[in-house]
Image (cartoon, rainbow, N blue to C red):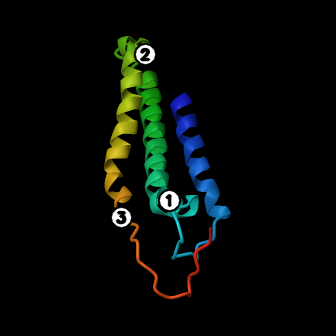
Amino acid sequence: MKALAVSDLILCASLLPHGFLLHDCIVHVRRSFHLIYWLYSGAVINTFILTSTWLTVTMAVGRYLAVSRPFHLKPLMDDLRSTRWTIIAIFVVSFLVNVPRFFENAVQSIPCQSSYFPLRR
């Protein structure tokens, strides 16, 4: 439950800037939070949605097995080490599945000859 709470907290924290940042800025004068957020937010959000979903599925399957086969799973239910490894595996696999999403967008530096985009310092 703690891992699910952490995953949901990070998901909510990564979704929060969507309500405050404007979507119309394509040209950035310098690297900023706005630029970095729009580059990587989709990958981070998708990673933690996937993590939360699989943690919920794992808990549901564990509860089902605990109710339907309590005597067969008694050794596994008492072992916190297997639970920790399952949670770590879910986080790692969710991240690895979403690695290509981190490389979907790229920042390109284009020299500006015009005075249309003045530098702000």
Where is residue 76 shown, x and y percent of the image?
37, 16
- Mark 3 or mark 1, earlier in chain: 1
Horizontal and vertical percent position of residue 15: 59, 55
Using the image, determine if residue 110 lies above or below residue 63.
below
Q: Disc 3 vs disc 1: which is toward the camera?
A: 1
- Mark 1 Cα shell of 10 Å, populated few (<14), some (14-19), many (≥20): few
Q: Quadrant of residue 119?
A: bottom right
Mark 2 touching mark 3, by CB under 8 A? no
Which residue, given by chain and number where applicable, does mark 1 sit on? 36
Left or right: 93 as drawn, with respect to 63: left
Pair 2/3: label in front? 3
Which of the labelled discs sits on residue 91, or is there none? none
Along the line of sight, which residue is nearer the eye, 82 or 24?
Answer: 24
Residue pushed farthest right?
A: 20
Instruction: Look at the picture and state if 118 lies above or below 34.
Output: below
The residue identified by callout 3 is: 104
- The residue under label 2 is 80
Query: In the image, residue 106 lies at what x, y percent?
Result: 38, 66
Residues at discs 1 and 2 in contact (Cβ within 8 Å): no
Q: Please tell me whether mark 1 sits on a helix, a strand or a loop.
A: helix
Q: Is residue 62 above or below residue 34?
A: above
- In three-dimensional space, the C-alpha distance between marks 2 and 3, rounded to whole angstroms, equals 38 Å
Specify the quadrant that holds the C terminus. bottom right
Residue occupying the point 52% across, 66% down: 30
